Image (cartoon, rainbow, N blue to C red):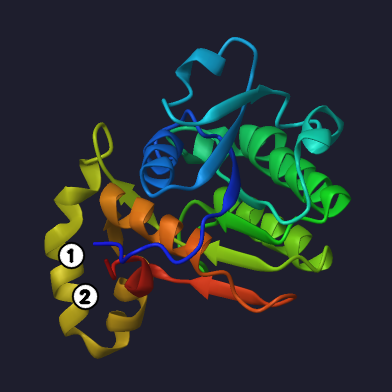
Amino acid sequence: MLGRMTQTRDVVVTGGTGYIGCRLVTALTARGHKVRVLARSGSAHRVPDGATAFVGNALDADSFAPALRPGDTLVHLVGTPHPSPSKAEEFVRVDLASVRASVAAARHAAISHFVYVSVAQPAPVMRAYVAVRAAGEKAIAEANLTTTILRPWYVLGPGHRWPLALIPFYTLASLVPWWRADASRLGLVTLTQMVDALARAVENPPPAGSRHIVEVPEIRTS
């Protein structure tokens, strides 16, 4: 469980009506944070209660940069739903374009903290997805933003449970010394763990100008 909040944050969430985003927005508002959610005009009604919606295009920095303020925390959650190898072009068109837009907007507004959901890496599969998320990390690093990057492999939750069939493999891999590190880095996390880890990231930014990487074992700490 999350500990007591120490400071109220002004948080902007992109992708705040999605699988992880809507739950994170609800958790942050419940803890007293002031949350604004970037939404398309047709999706503003889906923003959870307690948060403020503002309309913009996550792929166009100019459409939402004016809504950001110095000192904000920006949580970037835009991404292709249900990633698969067949969606490589969409990863570039949506995932990479949106994080680059968020980085540009963040620099323009001089926000205080950028939170990004990447992916565990290196990995033996989903190479296009991993490559795009790594490129997103690079864009953030080149912008010299104070950053927390979370690297889950797969987030288990409603409609996202098929990897439970892999539990026996993970159990076996954890017992074999030369597989153990990969099994830990590419382990499964629950939706609750992911939301908790994101909320902790918002509430505990790294020192100004630095970057904190949150791998699967730390995401599981809740």
Asked whether 5 or 26 is in front, the reply is 5
In the rendered image of this protein, does residue 159 appear above or below residue 33?
above
Q: Is residue 15 left or right of residue 56?
A: left
Residue name at image x 42 percent, y 33 percent:
22
| Residue count near mark 1 (Cα–Cα under 10 Å), binned few <14, some 14–19, many ≥20 | few
Q: Circles 2 and 1: CB distance less than 8 Å?
A: yes
Task: Give the position of the N terminus as an image quadrant.
Answer: bottom left
Task: Give the position of the C terminus as an image quadrant.
Answer: bottom left
Alpha carbon separation for disc pair 2 and 1 = 6 Å
Residue 143 pos. (x, y %): 83, 63
In the rendered image of this protein, does residue 203 appear above or below residue 160?
below
Q: Is residue 127 left or right of residue 57?
A: left
Residue 118 pos. (x, y %): 55, 56
- Regarding residue 123, the answer to whether it shows in the image is no
Name the kind of residue labelled 1 in the image. Phe
In the rendered image of this protein, does residue 178 appear above or below residue 119?
below
Q: Secondary structure at mark 2?
A: helix
Residue name at image x 51 percent, y 34 percent:
16
Residue 174 pos. (x, y %): 20, 78
Name the kind of residue labelled 2 in the image. Ala
Asked whether 111 or 171 is in front, the reply is 111
Which quadrant of the view contains residue 172?
A: bottom left
Q: Secondary structure at mark 1?
A: helix
Q: Is residue 21 left or right of residue 76?
A: left
Q: Is residue 219 left or right of residue 118?
A: left
Asked whether 57 or 201 is in front, the reply is 201
Q: Say which residue label 1 marks.
A: 169
Residue 76 pos. (x, y %): 60, 46
Question: Of all residues shown, which one is farthest toward the bottom?
Answer: 177
Residue name at image x 25 percent, y 89 percent:
177
Q: Which mark is residue 173?
A: 2
- Regarding residue 31, the answer to whether it shows in the image is yes
